[in-house]
Amino acid sequence: MTPSLRLDALFDAQEAQEKREQDAARRLAAEAAAKQELERQHFDQRPLTDADKQFFLRRIHTEFEHHEREALLASFPSDYCSDSGRHINHHLDGWEETLPGYARRIHDFWHADLRLGGFGFSARIISFSHDMMPQDVGLFVTWPEVRG
């Protein structure tokens, strides 16, 4: 007599389902990694345009008019930095050298233009992972509260 259900069949089905789920998870992880790498490459290669500069100037005006002392110009994952944000997080000398492509171009714009107008520049970690590792870097143009 043939049984109406076999335990081996249930285990086989369960194992097949687990394999499909693992394969799907691996596929999603690979797709996410590929997407993150494309975003990183885009950030690295992105030019600093005149439109970007005008946007930054408007942002500075707006923040100044609202009595703020800084304007966030851009943010990006700390993993984009050559040291994953370590120099920025610990305020170490040479942090500017760790900035990736587009962030470096923003810093260069500040250095060649806004610095001459009396503005400061800073980079700092603006978010941390649940285990307190640097997650996102913010680039800020700063100014004093009163005329110096």
Image (cartoon, helix red, strand yellow):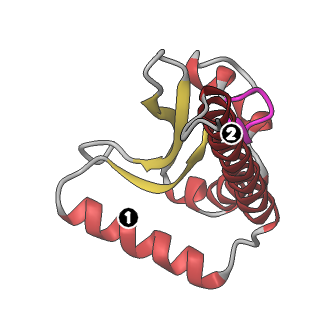
Left or right: 77 as drawn, with respect to 37: left
Q: Nearer the viewer, residue 146 or 70?
A: 70
> Within the image, what quadrant is residue 63 found in?
bottom left
- Residue stretch rendered in magenta on the structure: 79-84
Amino acid type, residue under disc 1 in the picture: Ile
Q: Residue furthest left?
A: 66
Left or right: 35 as drawn, with respect to 142: right
Residue 38 in magenta stretch: no
Asked whether residue 40 appears in the rendered view, the answer is yes
Q: Nearer the viewer, residue 9 or 58?
A: 9
Residue 21, horizontal then vertical, whole percent:
63, 44
Q: Which residue is mark 1?
A: 60
Q: Which secondary structure type mostly characterizes the magenta part of the structure?
A: loop
Residue 136 vs 147, above or below: the answer is above
Amino acid type, residue under disc 2 in the picture: Gln
Residue 70 vs 61, above or below: the answer is above
Q: Residue furthest bottom?
A: 51
Q: Residues within 10 Å of mark 1 (few under 14, many from 20)?
A: many
- Dot 2 lies on which element? helix
- Dot 1 lies on which element? helix
Left or right: 21 as drawn, with respect to 108: left
Q: Which residue is mark 2?
A: 22
Residue at 67% over, 52% down: 28
> Within the image, what quadrant is residue 127 found in?
top left
Mark with earlier residue (2, 1) = 2
Residue at 74% over, 52% down: 27
Q: Residues within 10 Å of mark 2 (few under 14, many from 20)?
A: few
Quarter of the picture holding the C terminus: top left
Q: Foreground mark, 2 or 1? A: 2
Residue at 70% over, 41% down: 16
